[in-house]
Image (spheres, rainbow, N blue to C red):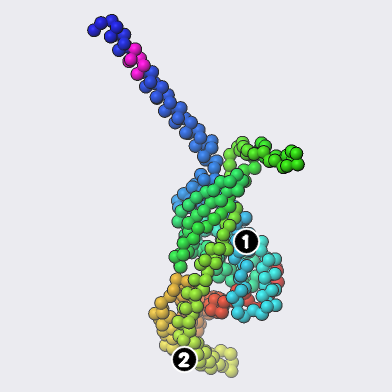
Amino acid sequence: MDDHTWRMRLAARRRRRRRERLFVLTLFVMAITAVFLYFSVYTKTPEFAMQEMVAAYRAGDADTFRRHVDLNSITLAAYDDLTSDLFKYDTQLSERERSLFENFYVLIRRQMCNGAVKVLNNYIDTREWILPGGILKGRQLGIDYDLLLDRSLIRHTSLIDLESVENRGEAVTATFSVVEDYSQVPFALKVTLKDLANDGFNIGGNEFEIFGKKIKFPGFTFNLGGSDWKVVSVDNYRGYLDAVSPLLRQNLAEYIDATAEIVERYNYEFAAQQNNFISMGKSPYGIMFANQRAEVTNYVTNTIIPTLENRQTELDQVPVPEGAQFLANLRQESTRVTILAWQSYVKGITENSAADLDTAESLHKQELALDQRIEEIVHNSAVTRNVPELP
């Protein structure tokens, strides 16, 4: 090999090594830049926040999920959407009563929304729907809170995925695909996001008037210490209710019609049995004799409880549309609690057990509450008959 050829090969080898080093350096710089952009830019975007929120929801990471949702803001806006037609289908209210209740539920908006936040926080932590109790327990505010939650659709709405995030400066909208579990109606739920970090500053964006014309220069927002993107409202929640609720009401009406004959027939039978039961228990001294207790025990065990079981068997044979599942479940629970109440009563009078009689009374109160809820659903009632006083 002559000297010229050797020099040419050596130069080519040097050039190749320089290219390889430059290539490796370029890859390294690109990797460092990508890492920098990811942690300093992308992780502060609303897109990243929503992806993180969805992942946290699926993984049961309550703290991360809660970090991206402003429940207080969401529930206040959603409450207005939900109650806008709350009394529309209540056939038992006069126009005056309807107006009174509409005004009343504006006054208790804060209490109702605080209860919703508590329910949602419990679900985020435990994945169980637990009623808030306190002022919303029972009917202190004139409404069945459990029924209100069912009408909100929140307990039977499933998140499918994050569809898109539209970022237009300060106005950021995310779209989620959801499905209502009973009707299987799909819906694109749109939410508004806000960065609540409160540590950014703006440059530009000012408006000037030149030669009589207003000109606005573009502005830029810089975030100094991070971001805190949160969902603050569900923009089309009313639209979601309007898309699903009519189908569920239709399902409910069909189920009520299909079971009306069964319910009416057994109601007459229960009324007659109640009269017989009262007659058997009458005593001039207010205390049943041994033969009366035996007669009552036999009547409850062999007539009343079997009648309850027969009615539930007939109801269970009626196909239940998905939208009527809540009512069907309530009827099953009412039957179960009623039978338990009668069994405790029988045990109480046969064993002279005050504890069992107290249990029977407590179960009977639960039964009455369930039956009232069932009546409200059947008659499209939203509230009790009288406007309650604020505690």
Question: How far is mark 1 from mark 2, CA to CA?
Answer: 52 Å
Kindly identify the amino acid type of the residue bearing the numbered disc 2.
Glu
Q: Does the magenta stretch include residue 46?
A: no
Q: In the depicted view, which residue is nearer to us: 308 or 74?
A: 74
Q: Percent from the top left, x then y, of residue 28?
A: 43, 27
Identify the residue shown where x is 61% and y is 74%.
88
Question: Hey, which residue is sitting farthest front in the picture?
Answer: 211
Q: Percent from the top left, x then y, of residue 134?
A: 62, 65
- Asked whether residue 337 is in view, the answer is no
Quarter of the image with the C terminus in it: bottom right
Kindly identify the amino acid type of the residue bearing the numbered disc 1.
Cys
Residue 295 circle label = 2
Quarter of the image with the N terminus in it: top left
Q: In the depicted view, which residue is nearer to us: 389 or 167?
A: 167
Mark 2 Cα shell of 10 Å, populated few (<14), some (14-19), many (≥20): some
Give the structural element (helix, strand or loop) at label 1.
Answer: helix
Identify the residue shown where x is 61% and y is 38%.
223
Please, what is the dominant secondary structure of the magenta stretch? helix
Q: In the depicted view, which residue is nearer to us: 317 or 289?
A: 317
In this rendering, the count of numbered labels is: 2
Identify the residue shown where x is 48% and y is 56%.
177
Side of 196 relative to 26 (left or right): right
Question: Hey, which residue is sitting farthest left in the picture?
Answer: 1
Image height of 372 relative to 277, above or below: above
Circle 1/circle 2 CB separation < 8 Å:
no
Identify the residue shown where x is 64% and y is 39%.
218
Mark 1 Cα shell of 10 Å, populated few (<14), some (14-19), many (≥20): many
Q: In the depicted view, which residue is nearer to us: 4 or 169?
A: 4
User: Which portion, as a residue range, is magenta?
Assistant: 11-16
Residue 113 circle label = 1
Of label 1 and label 2, which has the lower sequence position?
Answer: 1
Give the structural element (helix, strand or loop) at label 2.
Answer: helix
